[in-house]
Image (cartoon, rainbow, N blue to C red):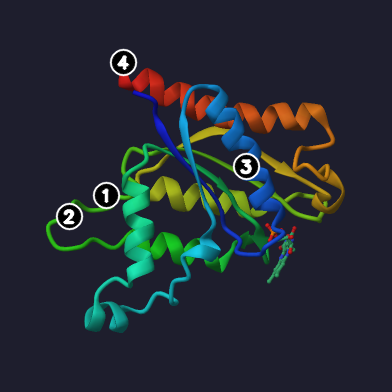
């Protein structure tokens, strides 16, 4: 059985550099034998997490859908934009909703023992590296096994070719390898 890996960016922007980046990692995971699902969070708009809303109406339909998709995959590839030196609200909101359990469901079912690689890109000089520190901390706190390898790509507006690949072939390989490594670890875990 091929491991299943979910790839998404913490940005809804149509021309998101992070969406472009995570596709490269997903391609690497596919080449290493994984089944990869690319998810665009723009297709699953969720309200801002609100405990009153959850108490009154339960988990909203799109948040439930997101959680179900998470549960159906063993690996995660997440490209996270850096907003004000940290995680984007879109990504944190999706994580917060997905961390909520429905009755009878195990705690953190969408996250526990998932193997993940994180990455970022930004037009700035640090490529979103400061945000990745927080993303790693959050995911690790909710039982995700975040692999040590990561990449933050600076000058996003100059980094990509029109076909979505990275101009720097060493960077391209590093990002592909992030996906491949998650696929390889999951394959080993299955055996
Ligand atoms: C940013 N951006 C940004 N970039 C960065 O390197 N460090 C930062 O702290 C921030 N802060 C920040 C805050 C807010 C509210 C916005 C809207 C943007 C710029 C950001 O990296 C840029 O918009 C990226 O293009 C966003 O990622 P996507 O949407 O291209 O994936």
Q: Disc 4 marks which residue?
A: 191
* Residue at x-position 39% and y-position 49%: 141
Q: Is mark 1 within 8 Å of ligand 1?
A: no
Q: Is residue 25 above or below residue 67?
A: above
Q: How far separated are the C-alphas under marks 2 and 1? A: 7 Å
Q: Is residue 188 above or below residue 68?
A: above
Q: Disc 2 marks which residue?
A: 105
Q: How far separated are the C-alphas under marks 2 and 3? A: 31 Å
Q: Disc 3 marks which residue?
A: 23
Q: How far separated are the C-alphas under marks 4 and 1? A: 22 Å
Secondary structure of residue under mark 1: loop
Secondary structure of residue under mark 2: loop
Disc ID at residue 109: 1
Residue 108 position within the rendered picture, expressed as x and y whole percent measured from the top left: 28, 52
Q: Residue furthest right?
A: 158
Residue 167 position within the rendered picture, expressed as x and y whole percent measured from the top left: 84, 36
* Residue at x-position 57% and y-position 36%: 26
Q: Is residue 33 above or below residue 119?
A: above
Crowdedness near tag 1: few (<14), some (14–19) or many (≥20) residues, C-alpha within 10 Å: many
* Residue at x-position 49% and y-position 29%: 182
Is there CB contact under 8 Å for labels 4 and 2? no
Q: Is residue 53 above or below residue 81?
A: below
Along the line of sight, the residue nearer the viewer: 20 or 50: 20
Residue 174: quadrant of the picture: top right
Sequence-first disc among 4 and 1: 1
């Amino acid at each position: 059985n091929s491991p299943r890996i979910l790839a998404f960016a913490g940005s809804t922007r149509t021309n998101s550099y992070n969406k472009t980046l995570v596709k490269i990692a997903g391609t690497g995971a596919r080449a290493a034998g994984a089944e990869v699902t690319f998810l665009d969070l723009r297709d699953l708009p969720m309200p801002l997490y609100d405990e009153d809303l959850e108490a009154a109406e339960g988990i909203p339909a799109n948040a439930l859908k997101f959680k179900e998709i998470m549960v159906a995959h063993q690996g995660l590839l997440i490209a996270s934009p850096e907003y004000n030196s940290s995680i984007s609200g879109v990504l944190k909101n999706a994580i917060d909703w997905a961390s909520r359990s429905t009755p009878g469901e195990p705690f953190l079912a969408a996250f526990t023992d998932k193997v993940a690689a994180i990455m970022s890109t930004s037009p700035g000089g640090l490529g979103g590296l400061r945000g990745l520190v927080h993303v790693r901390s959050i995911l690790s706190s909710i039982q995700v096994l975040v692999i040590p390898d990561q990449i933050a790509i600076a000058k996003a507006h100059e980094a990509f070719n029109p076909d979505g690949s990275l101009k720097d072939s060493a960077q391209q390989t590093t990002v592909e390898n992030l996906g491949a490594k998650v696929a390889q670890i999951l394959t080993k875990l299955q055996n």
